[in-house]
Amino acid sequence: MDVFFHSLNALVMIGLPIMLGVIFVKRLRVEWRLFLVGAATFVASQIGHLPFNSFALPGIFEFLGFSVQQTGFPLIGAALAAGLSAGIFEEGARYFVYRFWLRKERSWREALMFGLGHGGAEAIILGGLATYGLLQAIALRGADLASLLPADRVAQAAAQLEAYWSMPWHASLLGAVERCFALTIQISLAVLMLQAFTRKQVRWGIAGVLWHTSIDALSVFAFRMWNAYVAEALIAATAIASLVIILKLRDFDTESLETAALPSAEPPPPAKSIPAADADDITAEQVDDSRFV
């Protein structure tokens, strides 16, 4: 049964964005190309984001006195710094894609597919890692670790395997649950960034960076301060708020506004005319009727 829930976790992470992509293509009539552009945007953002987090962020933490191992201000500062890092790199990449790549895709429904691709790529990559971890755990289950690993790593590997297989079923599914929330959040961020171009106001892009920063900072703080369940509950709340953002910004769909502004294709009704006659034959009643034409 434990293998089933671990497998289900990985399957949902990989399959959910693909399933939603199929629904979006059919219902919203958008192209898979936008999903792939979103996926490429996420990957491109991580080319700078991951090295920054690995090499620069620890030095920033040390310089400012931040720490994820402590409580109070050090933890709050670390959470905000980590969140800001994600917000700048990911939303910065999204901005440049809108600015230089998706120059004609300016509708709400296209933003949904673009955001789904961004969050979907993250979910699929994490699902692949979860699958790899499961296969490793299956291969090492019951194996003689001393014959496979260096002596200094045997105890650590045994503890990790024990924790993996003794995990409650609901804990096994936390990754899939989080990806469900994250997809909604990523779509809302794509819609927010779109407003910077459709409304021509940079504040919407800044709002996207701050929203991303807040969500990531909140999740880091809650996970370190309390536990994964509290963190997921708070992420669920931000996902609901993200859904509200998506729906509220649907009205400002430039494509629908342009369609509404087009003139009607139907010709105007013919004007009522008075039959041709000599001036002497036009009666007072006909003159009165002509006022209402």
Image: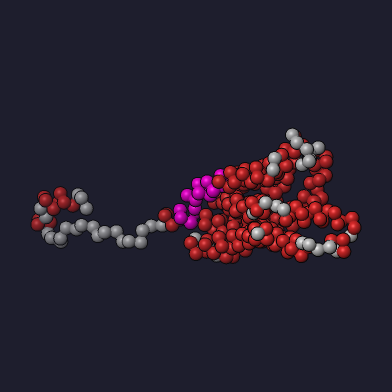
- Residue 28 in sight: yes
Q: Identify whether 72 is placed above or below 101.
A: above
Give the camera-side residue of 103 and 94. Answer: 94
Q: Residue 195's spot in the image, x, y percent?
A: 56, 49
Q: Residue 90's spot in the image, x, y percent?
A: 67, 52
Q: Locate residue 172: give its quadrant.
A: bottom right
Task: Residue lying at the far right in this picture: please name it.
Answer: 151
Q: Identify whether 126 is placed above or below 86.
A: below
Write the residue at 11% across / 55% down. 282
Q: Residue 181's spot in the image, x, y percent?
A: 60, 51
Q: Locate residue 233: give its quadrant.
A: top right
Q: Is residue 287 left or right of residue 115?
A: left
- Magenta: main secondary structure: helix
Write the residue at 59% across / 57% down. 116
Give the camera-side residue of 202 and 168. Answer: 168
Q: Is residue 150 left or right of residue 13?
A: right
Q: Residue 91's spot in the image, x, y percent?
A: 65, 51
Q: Is residue 25 magenta?
A: no
Count of all numbered marks drawn on residues in the image: 0
Q: Quadrant of the N terminus?
A: bottom right
Write down the region rendered in magenta: 241-258
- Residue 80 in sight: no
Write the residue at 65% across / 53% down. 169
Q: Is residue 61 left or right of residue 213?
A: right
Give the camera-side residue of 209 and 143. Answer: 143
Q: Identify whether 123 is placed above or below 72.
A: below
Write the residue at 18% across / 52% down. 290
Give the camera-side residue of 71 and 26. Answer: 71
Q: Is residue 249 magenta?
A: yes
Task: Residue lying at the far top in this picture: please name it.
Answer: 72
